[in-house]
Image (spheres, helix red, strand yellow):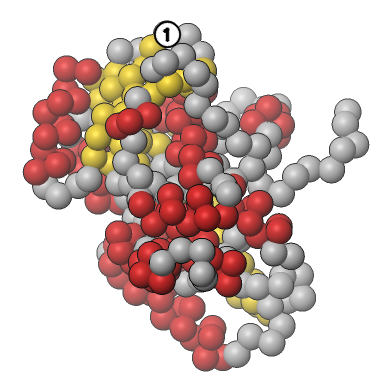
Amino acid sequence: MSAKGLAIGKLPPDLLAELLVTGRPAPPELLLPPTVGEDAGVVAVERGALVAASDPVTLTGQDVGAHAVIVNANDIAVMGARPRWFTATVLLPPGITEAEVRALYRRMHEALAGLDAVLVGGHVEVTDAVRRTVVVGHMMGLREDGDFARTAALEPGQTVVQIGPAPVEGAAVLAAEAGDLLRGRVAAATLAEAAGALAEPGISVVDAALRAAALGASAMHDPTEGGLSAGLYEMAEAAEIGLVVSADAVLWYEPGRILSEALGIDPWGLLASGALLAAFPTGEAEAALATLSAEGFACATIARAEAGRGVAFEDGGPVPRFARDEMIRVVSAGE
């Protein structure tokens, strides 16, 4: 047993897999237990399948109420369910004002209304355990037909489509948390565009995921912490297969790339909410891509699934993998 302290960020996959083992048989109503690489769990209920997910927002204080709603809604939508019910644990730092708390909840309610979802409970307190506001969200949705998508359903021969560019979330957080470092290094217009990225192009993949599911996507995944790279690795490892990635086909959010370059970090490993990975049977991918494109979704085929393990570029080199999100390097350097 190692006594070495853990680094900031996601737990190592092997450790997380160990922690998720309960030592007891899963009850029959638990259709999808907590599993590395899956975005949500699924519980059978009388009316179908209840899909539930929980995610915190910790790396930024920017519009954190709405941010928490959207990242949790994304995890429900990639399972093929519409987000419906939200709870939030809100931890507020000492010194926060009533006006700031009202603004946080106003934006949270606005984000929920945009999804036709609703706040159903939670907890809020001021505590010296945090230095800035932390929101831990929990979203639920219902599939009345009992069906759901899962990351591990990816199979050899399938095509992986990226819907939406990356790193949109990373660009917005960099602009908010490293604005002082970036001023003078990048054009003011680029920094301003990145600062508004949570709203435009936005980080929600709910519409894209539900549309992809309707078009026959067999597996979907929502890249978040660890960037597009982590999303691809998590998808491959959940399905226990390999992915061959076309680097030239990847959709990049240009302000995110520019800000990353200015700070010496890699956009492959930067917060990637706003991009969706959807797998289609190869014979159906072309038609799905054409439909999504015609409906206004930015999309491209970026990978194919093959027997084997690992995530590599077409030239055989491995896709870079990051022990922690590149954002953490920036946040840590500023402390």
Does residue 127 appear in this view? yes
Q: Residue at x 45, y 30 (%)?
A: 232
Q: Is residue 242 above or below residue 105?
A: above
- Residue occupied by mark 1: 307
Mark 1 belongs to which amino acid? Ala
Who is closer to the viewer here, 16 or 222?
Answer: 222
Label 1 element class: loop
Who is closer to the viewer here, 92 or 295?
Answer: 295
Does residue 143 appear in this view? no
Report x, y in % for residue 199.
33, 66
- Quadrant of residue 278 in the image? top left
Q: In this image, 317 relative to 155: left or right?
A: right
Q: Residue at x 46, y 83 (%)?
A: 103
Q: Residue at x 74, y 65 (%)?
A: 335
Q: Is residue 190 above or below residue 17?
A: below
For the N terminus, the quadrant is: top right
